[in-house]
Amino acid sequence: MAATALIIVDLQNDFCPGGTLAVREGDQVVPVVNALIARFSGQGAPIFATRDWHVADHISFVAQGGIWPPHCVQATRGAQFHPDLQLPGDAAIISKGERQDRDAYSGFDGTDLADRLKALAVEKLVVCGLATDYCVKATVLDGLEAGFGVEIMAAGIRGVEVAPGDSQGAIDKMVERGAVMSAAP
Ligand code: VGL
Ligand code: ZN
């Protein structure tokens, strides 16, 4: 039977209020994501959590000429998942952006995510997490490109909004490419 996987994107402390690259209301997605986790766990469906996992002198950081403050540095508190996230022990964790000289917004970029999903006969992804206008967008677009159906949980995403309207622009692009926005878990 074709499976649906839950993809939780970068629900890490640095992207939540108090973090170094805080997304407004980023922590408000946690209860929504926990409800999705409960649903997927109950159905025995696969759960993947991506994480931004940078070295301390990552190329995307301002000191190296990048555009971001240091964030999600490997093994720091900021890189840990939000403490209230109820990630089951058997959830698969996909680290990305590990290379010093290259950024990776998408959970598929430089990882074995696509292979692992295909090995589980997954055909559809339910996506939630942070940030709408960067890593959620890149992950969704790559997922569509790889042939997966993608449903995005509207209440389970928030954006960085470097410029106002970036999140809506990202949603428009994801929908234009074939993703479906879903209101409730
Ligand atoms: C992200 C900016 C920089 C994200 C990661 O997870 O959306 N945004 N690195
Ligand atoms: Zn990053």
Image (cartoon, rainbow, N blue to C red):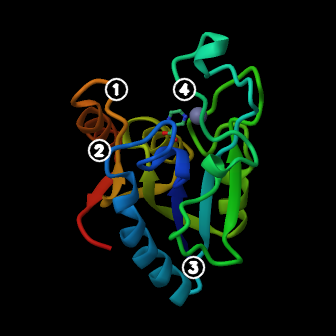
In this figure, which residue is indicated by the disc labeled 4?
A: 69
Of the 4 image quadrants, the one containing the C terminus is bottom left
Please report contact status of discs 3 and 1: CB closer than 8 Å, yes or no: no
- Looking at the image, residue 6 sits to the left or right of residue 128; the answer is right
Q: Nearer the viewer, mark 3 or mark 1?
A: 1
> Helix, strand, or loop for circle 1?
loop
Q: Earlier in the sequence, mark 3 or mark 4?
A: 3
Residue at the spot 55% in from the left edge and 52% down from the top edge: 12
Q: Position of residue 136 (x, y in %)?
A: 45, 45
Residue at the spot 64% in from the left edge and 69% down from the top edge: 121
Q: Earlier in the sequence, mark 4 or mark 1?
A: 4
Which kind of residue does numbered mark 1 sit on? Val
In this figure, which residue is indicated by the disc labeled 2?
A: 175
> Helix, strand, or loop for circle 4?
loop
Q: Nearer the viewer, mark 3 or mark 4?
A: 4
Please report contact status of discs 3 and 4: CB closer than 8 Å, yes or no: no
Q: Residues within 10 Å of mark 1 (few under 14, many from 20)?
A: few
In this figure, which residue is indicated by the disc labeled 1?
A: 162
Q: Position of residue 115 (x, y in %)?
A: 72, 54
